[in-house]
Image: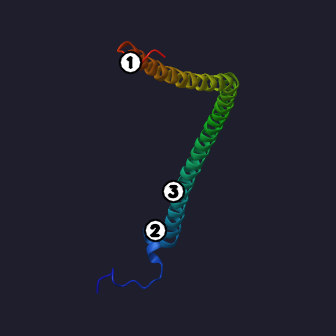
Amino acid sequence: ADSDDDDDGSGDDAATTGFDPATSLADAAEATFLKVSDAVRADADAVSAEFRHLAAMNQSAGARYAAIGRRVGDAHVFADKVRKVQDAGIAPQLARLEEIEASVGSLENAANALDARCAELERRFARVVDGEVGDA
């Protein structure tokens, strides 16, 4: 029989080769654990860095939105002031324009009535000139 096949489990291999399987397995397990631990820590650090970055972005966006909100508020106040000035300055003028338009309408009606009366007088005058109407 071959001498390699005659392993009686007596541990003579460690004594003859300097290789202890139990110690090597423990060392390999420890090395594997440390590598996995390093990988998990690197992942946690990456996630933590991403959260810090997102928090900074949110803070920046919040500051920008607050500034936009202040500008919109300022624009609203400005527009309200402009509207009030326009209402105070233009409203009386608009009312006066309405009065003028009403007066113009009355004048147009009077002019139309005068024009109609003039046309009637011209027709009567023409009849008098043509001798259709006697001396009255």
Labels 2, 1: front one: 1
Q: CA distance from mark 2 to mark 1?
A: 149 Å
- Mark 2 neighbour density, 10 Å: few (under 14) some (14–19) many (20 or more): few
Q: CA distance from mark 1 to mark 3?
A: 121 Å
Element type at mark 3: helix
Residue with the most extreme left position? 1
Nearer the observer, 69 or 107:
107
| Vertical order, 38 against 125 (above or below) | below
* Circle on res. 39: 3
**Cβ–Cβ under 8 Å for marks 2 and 1:** no
Number of numbered labels in the structure image: 3
- Name the quadrant containing residue 124: top left
Instruction: Work out whether mark 2 precedes mark 1 in sequence or the reverse, and give the earlier one.
Output: 2
| Vertical order, 73 against 7 (above or below) | above
What residue would you read off at disc 1? Answer: 127
Relative to residue 82, is residue 129 drawn left or right? Answer: left
* Circle on res. 19: 2
Element type at mark 1: helix
Query: Residue 54, how many percent across, how many down?
Result: 57, 46
- Name the quadrant containing residue 55: top right
| Vertical order, 58 against 68 (above or below) | below
- Mark 3 neighbour density, 10 Å: few (under 14) some (14–19) many (20 or more): few
Element type at mark 2: loop
Query: Residue 79, how many percent across, how many down?
Result: 64, 29
* Circle on res. 96: none
| Vertical order, 100 against 44 (above or below) | above
The quadrant the N terminus occupies is bottom left
* Residue at the image position 33 percent from the left and 81 percent from the top: 3
Q: CA distance from mark 2 to mark 3?
A: 30 Å
Nearer the observer, 113 or 45:
113
